[in-house]
Image (cartoon, helix red, strand yellow):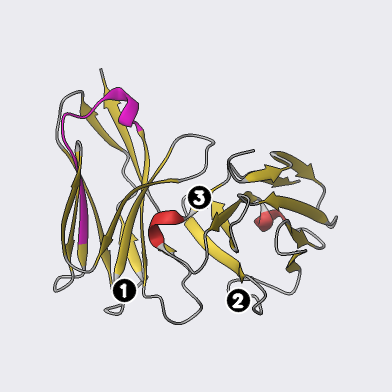
Amino acid sequence: GAGVSQSPSNKVTEKGKDVELRCDPISGHTALYWYRQSLGQGLEFLIYFQGNSAPDKSGLPSDRFSAERTGGSVSTLTIQRTQQEDSAVYLCASSMGQFSGNTIYFGEGSWLTVV
Amino acid sequence: QKEVEQDPGPLSVPEGAIVSLNCTYSNSAFQYFMWYRQYSRKGPELLMYTYSSGNKEDGRFTAQVDKSSKYISLFIRDSQPSDSATYLCAMSDYGGSQGNLIFGKGTKLSVKP
């Protein structure tokens, strides 16, 4: 597809279960970002991948959160032992090359509900 | 004090009104300023991008940056019902952690026909 693709679009999981969220960036985009958007909290940076460089994990809220990017393309965000406070929209974005504010494209998000 | 402050609204205006949306920030290192529009259950889409201080106009939209006051604005002229969305400001210093954007919480705008 032409845009950033995320799956699943909606996920309801029980507290304590692990979840995996997938992001397929725009073809050719070397930078990939994960953000979390909670109700009334705006977008919170989680992690950033740029090419083959070590990812910037400074935004991950706890060691229950991890992400990987295989082959410089698809990325998976994993949340282990989910908690109710993890309920949010998880947004993936990609851009061409080094970060440039006018080329970041967002997916439609994965809506996670932890019950 | 949060790095970026944005009034969450909601803001309701009649069709045709001029809308003013604002953000303040505390980090003087921010150089890149953006406005995103987010429709319900959609991802944010970039509306305007400005580097450093000054104005930028694109159709009905004007973005202003005042770095001396650490204040940015987005003006929407002749507002339309299709402008109803949440507007997020975002900014970056390109330094620190490799260029991640710092977002405001968003202002929810409703334009009534």
User: CA separation, marks 3 and 1?
Assistant: 21 Å
Depth order, front residue of A89/B67: B67
Residue marked by disc 3: A105
Give amino acid for label 1: Phe
Q: For residue B54, what is the image quadrant?
A: bottom left
Which residue lies at the image location 16% right of the left edge and 25% below the top edge?
B16
Residue marked by disc 1: B30
Depth order, front residue of A38/B27: B27
| Label 3 element class | strand
Q: Position of residue A31 (x, y in %)?
A: 58, 64
Q: Which residue is situated farthest in the top direction here?
A: B113
The segment highlighted magenta reads B72-84
Residue A56 is tagged as 2
Q: Are marks 1 and 2 in contact (CB under 8 Å)?
A: no
Asked if badge 3 and badge 2 are on a common chain, one would say yes
Chain name for mark 2? A
Q: Is residue A4 above or below residue B67?
A: above
- Marks 3, 2: nearer the viewer: 3
| Label 1 element class | loop
Give amino acid for label 3: Tyr
Chain name for mark 1? B
Position of the C terminus of chain B, as image quadrant, is top left
Which residue lies at the image location 52% right of the left edge and 43% below the top edge?
B43
Position of the N terminus of chain B, as image quadrant, is bottom left
* B82 part of magenta stretch: yes
Is A63 situated left or right of A34 in this image?
right
